[in-house]
Amino acid sequence: MLTKRLIACFDIIGGRVTKAVKFQDNIDVAPAGELADTMYKEQIDELIFYDITASSEKRGIDIETVKSVAKRVFIPFTVGGGIKSLDDMYEALKAGAEKISVDSMAVRNPQIITEGSKAFGAQCVVLSTQVKRVGASPKIPSGFEVFIDGARVATGMDAIEWIRRGQDLGAGEICVNSIDNDGTLAGYDLELMKLAEAAVSVPLIASGGAGAPEHLKALFTETEAQAAIISSMLYSPRMPKNYTVRELKTCLADSGVNVREPLD
């Protein structure tokens, strides 16, 4: 049985990790390299790094910060934000990333998924989606719409249809970000994840809403998600309590969830 993965997520602005609520009101946390070092020493399974203003500012990803993080961690490391071409993917991989996340640019140019998958392998391409509940309609039958540019721009695209298409285009993994739940500490959107898992067969990463170990347990026991993004629980100043990776994995293991338990 595959182990479930815990992924620390860094939303980067100017080389520093920030934390938002529903993709807004980001507060400063720490330098990206320093926090990456802490997460690695705590034995987090993976790390995802989003340069969250790159797309809206129409610039490339912050390569220097990618390098700063990569030299401190020796676990799977995914980067996204400002990826517009195969050359951008190559530069991020050369800087130390193992996987590339595409989001806004994939909506604008879906072929970047296929091009990346052919050039670097499907396992290297993660389709990230920013998803918001808007109510079912003929145009958006699932009731979930795709947003881009840091959740600022509505696309009119049905989220479930988009992730199905992303899989067909060659994405090897899909991250489903709930805008409604992001930073709320109220738990993952399990309905959204169940719709996603019914639509695709590639691994799914759940993102948005984790605030307690019970939320991770619910995700992994009630859905087929293979991984969970956590950030607030680990390092947000807004949290009344920050958890260690060991605490979270111990709780999951005690609940029967198969995780890679930290080494002593």
Image (cartoon, helix red, strand yellow):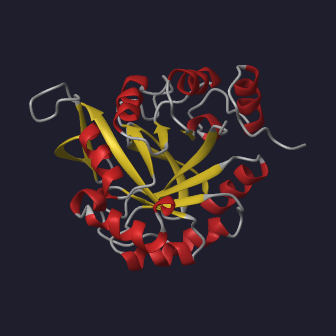
State the residue at coordinates (17%, 25%): 136
Q: Is residue 137 above or below residue 172?
A: above
Q: Is residue 128 above or below residue 227?
A: below
State the residue at coordinates (53%, 30%): 210
State the residue at coordinates (67%, 54%): 35
Question: Between 236 and 243, which is closer to the camera in this rendering?
Answer: 243
**Image quadrant occupied by the C terminus:** top right
**Image quadrant occupied by the N terminus:** top right
Relative side of 150 to 5, left or right: left
* Image coordinates for residue 193, horizontal then vertical, percent: 41, 30
Relative side of 104 to 175, left or right: left
Total numbered circles: 0
* Image coordinates for residue 259, horizontal then vertical, percent: 71, 35
State the residue at coordinates (32%, 45%): 163
Question: Between 237 and 231, which is closer to the camera in this rendering?
Answer: 231
Question: Between 120 and 209, which is closer to the camera in this rendering?
Answer: 120
Relative side of 208 to 6, left or right: left
* Image coordinates for residue 156, horizontal then vertical, percent: 15, 43
Q: Is residue 178 above or below residue 99?
A: above
Q: Looking at the image, which residue sits at the far right?
A: 264
Q: Looking at the image, which residue sits at the far left?
A: 138
Which of the 4 image quadrants contains residue 194? top left
Which of the 4 image quadrants contains residue 119? bottom left
* Image coordinates for residue 79, horizontal then vertical, percent: 50, 61
Q: Is residue 231 above or below residue 60?
A: above
